[in-house]
Amino acid sequence: MSKIIIFLGPPGAGKGTQAQLLKERNGFIQVSTGDLLREAVKNQTELGKLAKKYMDEGKLVPDDLIISLIKEKLQEYADKNIIFDGFPRTIPQAESLDNLLFQLDKNIDAVILFKIEDEEVVKRLAGRRVCPSCGAVYHVIYNPPKIDEICDKCGTKLIQRDDDKEEVIRKRLEVYHQQTKPLIEYYKSKIVEIDATDNPENIYNKIVSMI
């Protein structure tokens, strides 16, 4: 029986890293709404064209359109294990997802909550540096380049992405606390907490043992 898991937690908690590991090592399908939207727009599907219209106007893509994209993905991968990463973000989205899963005769097996303090998130994300040429990722504290601000691989000067700047991170955290944190109460019967400050390999092993 295929499993459906939701990763819940603030930006910078390491959800993407763990989703990637489960994808590579355990064959999970990662459902990220950003990826779904980009794929639908690129393939010029009917839903993609509709989504592009909203995006071109600088508007948020409505929840019902996102749910339709998710439905297509769940039907395409009916027999696969699924991770929802970054969705749902709000209670209405969680309710819509519950309705969809009910229609498809599926259930959420676990909601994994990545626990981490805001200041740790700021330290993690604000310290991130990326190479604009080869895409290598560094961290000023945890994974610094050999020569300050210079990429080890190709010698290009490293940059800090706009969304890794402290004021932007704090804004993202504010949005998380207002909109997404209420989901902890919503999913309380399915929540499993994990210490997101632990070593990534330990976190991976814990997740695998839980599911």
Image (cartoon, rainbow, N blue to C red):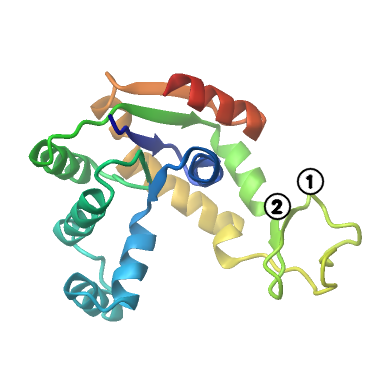
Task: Give x and y (percent) for residue 180.
Answer: 33, 41
Task: State how many labels appear.
Answer: 2
Task: Give x and y (percent) for residue 197.
Answer: 62, 30
Give the residue at x 37% y 53%: 32
Residue 78 sits in which quadrant? top left
Q: Is residue 34 left or right of residue 62?
A: right
* Quarter of the image that includes the C terminus: top left
* Quarter of the image that includes the N terminus: top left
Viewer-proximal residue among 122 and 195: 195
Q: Is residue 7 left or right of residue 135?
A: left
Question: Taking 42 as reference, is 160 above or below it?
Answer: above
Numbered badge on residue 141: 1
Question: Taking 201 as reference, is 77 above or below it?
Answer: below
Viewer-proximal residue among 32 and 121: 32
Give the residue at x 39% y 44%: 176
Numbered badge on residue 127: 2
Viewer-proximal residue among 166 and 53: 53
Numbered badge on residue 37: none
Which amino acid, by three-letter code, is at mark 2?
Gly
Which amino acid, by three-letter code, is at mark 1?
Ile
Counting residues from the start of the chain, the first of labels 1 and 2 encountered is 2
Q: Is residue 67 left or right of residue 12?
A: left
- Mark 1 residue crowding within 10 angstroms, few (<14) / some (14–19) / many (20+): few
> Tag 2, which secondary structure?
loop
Task: Give x and y (percent) for residue 89.
Answer: 31, 46
Q: Are marks 1 and 2 in contact (CB under 8 Å)?
A: yes
